[in-house]
Image (cartoon, grey):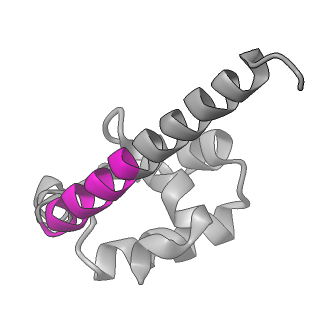
Amino acid sequence: MTLADPTRRRIIASLRNGERQVNDIVREAGIHQSGVSRHLRILHDAGFVTVRADGQRRLYALRENPFRELDAWLADYRSLWETRLDRFGAAIGERRKARAADDKEPPR
């Protein structure tokens, strides 16, 4: 998957604040220019990034729609995991209460 790569996620994080040139992304993401260009091409081909010419410069920006689609798809899974994590948290809380009660009992 396009977003599974940690380098591409760093590039996306760099673009969250708006349009950036490749050199800006290189500085912010801490990746060599050739790597940034390669990952930007992958992100562009997958539809996550747009590129716009501004004279000699190329400005990259995130496209909102793919992220909205991803968020909608994840919503079902998010609610499933939140329910499971809530149950897990409740079980841990009960275990802590039981342990605290055991610690308060006088020795026999």
On screen, residue 4 versus residue 73, left or right, reads right
Q: Residue at x 35, y 32 (%)?
A: 17
Image location (x, y in percent) of residue 39: 52, 72
Report which quarter residue 107 is drawn in.
top right
Whether the magenta-drawn stretch holds residue 85 is answered as yes
Q: How many marks?
A: 0
Q: Which quadrant does the N terminus fall into?
A: bottom left
Question: Which stretch appears magenta?
Answer: 73-87
On screen, residue 32 versus residue 72, left or right, reads right
**52 and 108: which one is in front?**
108
Image location (x, y in percent) of residue 71: 18, 58
On screen, residue 8 versus residue 12, left or right, reads right
**81 and 108: which one is in front?**
108
Q: Is residue 98 above or below residue 31?
A: above
Report which quarter residue 74 is drawn in.
bottom left
Q: Residue at x 10, y 60 (%)?
A: 65
Image location (x, y in percent) of residue 92: 54, 42
Q: Residue at x 65, y 70 (%)?
A: 35
On screen, residue 93 versus residue 67, left or right, reads right
**56 and 76: which one is in front?**
76
Q: Is residue 51 visible?
A: no
Q: Is residue 41 above or below residue 21?
A: below
Please identify the residue farthest to the front as the structure is shown: 108
Q: Is residue 95 visible?
A: yes
Dominant secondary structure, magenta: helix
Q: Residue at x 24, y 67 (%)?
A: 77
Whether the magenta-drawn stretch holds residue 103 is answered as no
Q: Is residue 30 above or below residue 43?
A: above
